[in-house]
């Protein structure tokens, strides 16, 4: 334990009275004991105690609070509990712009929002067979190597040499129980962070590399990296990263003591405001500027740059719902739309264009060309799991979430008006839409759905109107008419996709291609759409109808066979021929027997009635008619006894008559009366 005494008090705080010295010693000792009881180590607890004692004793210069500012010192690691899970949060500098492994990463390529929720692993994951590096954004890799994620990523200021450059600063959120359970390097990294020891980190990302020689701040490079797509951040307790501790990276970022004695510019900028200076009355402008910069970075939140549509679309939906609304994540939307597990965790820029169009169609302002999840699914209002328009989502666009969105006012107004129109038409809300002047009316976004081949319905390559295009699927050649390209003439004829409404209240007539697709959906019994659904289907756009066509069809329920031929068709091939021979013989027997009955003048049955009977029944009628059964020589006809009279009645002699039963009941009644049993 350090000697918190009068000498230490006067060393760290000038011009103290005896009473203030005693106060300083008491505060420092109390703060030190409390820090050690909370599990801290001696060095950080001593510094914390000295700062606390300096802050409450003596007279602040210039009526300013005592505040120690360290540019690269953010906060020590802390234990946080969230959802009954223990997390260790630690500040981290992930990347400093400059040359890494011979490749230049410029300041413009550091995009903080792309790194939010980036997985944290212990070391860089590799393939167990080949040893090659692999992506950490796979469930099995995260299960074996993942220990947490990075959050609250923002831009900081690091240095390369003596020049200030941009850096990526964030917070590590690490699962304490998981790291302790993994042991090994995971436990070692956890121990280093809790002890505030320097821990190396290393970033892993995909990028577009362009070869080219050059030099950046005196460091040569052989290529430049653009369009960084983060994959993971690796903790390296026993290795050194490309951006190492000396370069300004690592966790937690702590300054070491400088040997200059406080005379170098860096120490002057990070010196405590109550430290001795040439002008003790007020802090130096350099230190004030450092304080202002630090506070501005701490409280300032960089505005999100959104790439949303300037005018709201009519979303694609089938049906409505008024259930509780929770905005889906991009992964949930992709899963509901049938995307693979790899697509659910992939970067937005790596998703196929068709899937991005389906995701954007669930929202009002989502841009299919967006490169991040927020802009792709901006203002979602359709539940991807049910495909239904949600009333709560529409009301959220109009109220709090919509009014606080950091987007252009014209786009916000357009989205809220679309939400009101959908509430009025689908839920009978009776809301009024905001009127806009022609000058304020946003431009109608052009349709970005690729044109389709009329022969095979596959997507066509991009082309300008009037150009000949060959379908890559079937080879059909056609001339591109007025399709979805931006900059088309507004007066051109209607496109294959559904045109936007002329006014907010007017719903346009469906185009021929829309009618054709609706007819096909209704005609196909396996889709289960009926004529009653026509108005709903014709109000949707072509992209949504195509999506309905691609949905799994209801199975056709086939009942039992009604004819012999249908029954034979269900048999295996080796049994069909003998069964067909038996069926032919059966038909010949039945036909021959019917001919015999029809030739009989007394036959009460018509030929159609006989055809509905079985062959055995018809042959029985032939026997009853007294004729020989054709094709069955062993069956004898019934003898005809007509005209010979019926059987004679035989008289029974008196001696053969059956005697009458004795009248015993009367005797029983008489006996019971004698006994007094009955009156």
Image: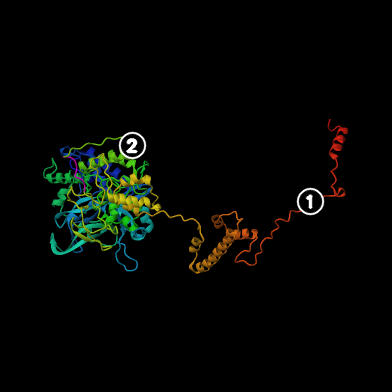
Residue 508 in view (yes/no): yes
Viewer-proximal residue among 120 and 561: 561
Q: Position of residue 520 (x, y in %)?
A: 34, 52
Q: Residue furthest top?
A: 679
Q: Position of residue 574 (x, y in %)?
A: 50, 69
Q: Secondary structure at mark 1?
A: loop
Query: Alpha-carbon neighbours of circle 2 within 10 Å: few (<14), some, or many (≥20)?
Result: few
Count of marks overlaid on the render: 2
The span picked out in magenta is 439-445
From this view, report whether residue 491 is shown above or below residue 620. above
Viewer-proximal residue among 98 and 560: 560
Q: Which residue is mark 1?
A: 649
What residue is drawn where x is 49% and y is 61%? 566
Q: Give the main secondary structure of the magenta stretch.
A: loop
Viewer-proximal residue among 513 and 270: 513
Q: Secondary structure at mark 2?
A: loop
Residue 175 in view (yes/no): no
Q: Which mark is residue 428?
A: 2
Display colour scheme = rainbow
Query: Closer to the observer: label 2 or label 1?
Result: 1
Q: Is residue 638 left or right of residue 437?
A: right
From this view, report whether residue 244 is shown above or below residue 62. below
């Amino acid at each position: 334990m350090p000697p918190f005494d009068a000498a230490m008090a006067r060393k760290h705080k000038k011009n103290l009275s005896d009473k203030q010295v005693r106060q300083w010693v008491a505060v420092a000792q109390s703060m030190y004991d409390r820090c050690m009881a909370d599990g801290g180590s001696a060095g950080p607890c001593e510094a914390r105690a000295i700062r606390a004692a300096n802050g409450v004793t003596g007279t602040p210069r210039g009526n300013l609070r005592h505040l120690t500012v360290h540019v690269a010192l953010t906060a020590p690691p802390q234990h946080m509990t969230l959802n009954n899970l223990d997390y260790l949060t630690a500040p981290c500098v992930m990347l400093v712009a400059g040359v890494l492994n011979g490749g230049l990463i410029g300041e413009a390529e550091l995009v903080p929002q792309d790194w939010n929720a980036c997985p944290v692993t212990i070391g860089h994951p590799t393939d167990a067979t080949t040893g090659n590096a692999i992506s950490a954004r796979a469930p099995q890799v995260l299960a074996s190597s993942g220990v947490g994620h990075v959050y609250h990523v923002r831009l900081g200021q690091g240095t390369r040499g003596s020049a200030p450059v941009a850096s990526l600063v964030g917070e590590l959120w690490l699962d304490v129980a998981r790291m302790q359970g993994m042991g090994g390097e995971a436990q070692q990294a956890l121990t280093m962070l809790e002890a505030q020891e320097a821990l190396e980190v290393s970033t892993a990302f995909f990028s577009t590399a362009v070869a080219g020689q050059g030099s950046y701040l005196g460091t040569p490079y052989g290529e430049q990296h653009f369009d960084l797509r983060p994959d993971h951040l690796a903790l390296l307790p026993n290795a050194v990263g490309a951006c190492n501790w000396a370069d300004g990276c690592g966790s937690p970022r702590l300054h070491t003591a400088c040997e200059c004695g406080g005379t170098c510019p860096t120490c002057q900028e990070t010196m405590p405001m109550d430290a001795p200076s040439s002008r003790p009355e007020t802090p130096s402008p350099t230190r004030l500027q450092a304080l202002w910069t630090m506070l501005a970075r701490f409280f300032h939140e960089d505005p999100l740059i959104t790439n949303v549509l300037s005018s709201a679309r009519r979303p694609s939906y089938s049906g409505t719902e008024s259930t509780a609304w929770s905005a889906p994540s991009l992964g949930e939307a992709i899963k509901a739309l049938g995307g693979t597990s790899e697509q659910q965790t992939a970067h937005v820029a790596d998703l196929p264009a068709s899937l991005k169009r389906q995701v954007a169609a669930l929202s009002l302002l989502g841009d299919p060309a967006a490169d991040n999840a927020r802009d792709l699914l901006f203002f979602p209002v359709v539940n991807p799991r049910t495909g239904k328009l949600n009333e709560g989502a529409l009301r959220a666009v109009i109220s709090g979430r919509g009014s606080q969105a950091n987007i252009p006012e014209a786009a916000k107004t357009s989205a809220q008006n679309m939400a009101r129109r959908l509430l009025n038409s689908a839920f009978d809300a009776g809301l009024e839409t905001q009127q806009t002047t022609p000058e304020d009316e946003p431009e109608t976004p052009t349709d970005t759905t690729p044109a389709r081949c009329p022969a095979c319905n596959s997507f066509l390559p991009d082309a300008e109107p009037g150009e000949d295009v060959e379908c890559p699927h079937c080879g059909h050649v056609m001339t591109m008419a007025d399709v979805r390209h931006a900059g088309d003439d507004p007066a051109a004829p209607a496109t294959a996709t559904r045109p936007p409404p002329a006014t907010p209240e007017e719903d346009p007539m469906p185009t021929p291609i829309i009618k054709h697709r609706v007819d096909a959906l209704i005609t196909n019994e396996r889709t289960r759409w009926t004529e009653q659904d026509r108005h709903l289907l014709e109000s949707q756009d072509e992209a949504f109808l195509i999506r309905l066509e691609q949905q799994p069809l209801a199975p056709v329920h086939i009942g039992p066979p009604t004819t012999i031929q249908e029954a034979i068709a269900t048999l295996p091939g080796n049994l069909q021929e003998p069964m067909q021979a038996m069926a032919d013989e059966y038909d010949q027997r039945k036909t021959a027997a019917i001919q015999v009955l029809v030739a009989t003048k007394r036959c009460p049955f018509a030929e159609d009635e006989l055809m509905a009977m079985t062959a055995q029944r018809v042959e029985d009628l032939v026997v009853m008619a007294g004729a020989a059964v054709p094709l069955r020589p062993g069956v004898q006809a019934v003898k005809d006894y007509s005209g010979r009279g019926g059987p004679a009645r035989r008289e029974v002699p008196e001696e053969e008559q059956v005697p009458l039963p004795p009248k015993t009941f009367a005797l029983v009644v008489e006996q019971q009366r004698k006994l007094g049993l009955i009156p």
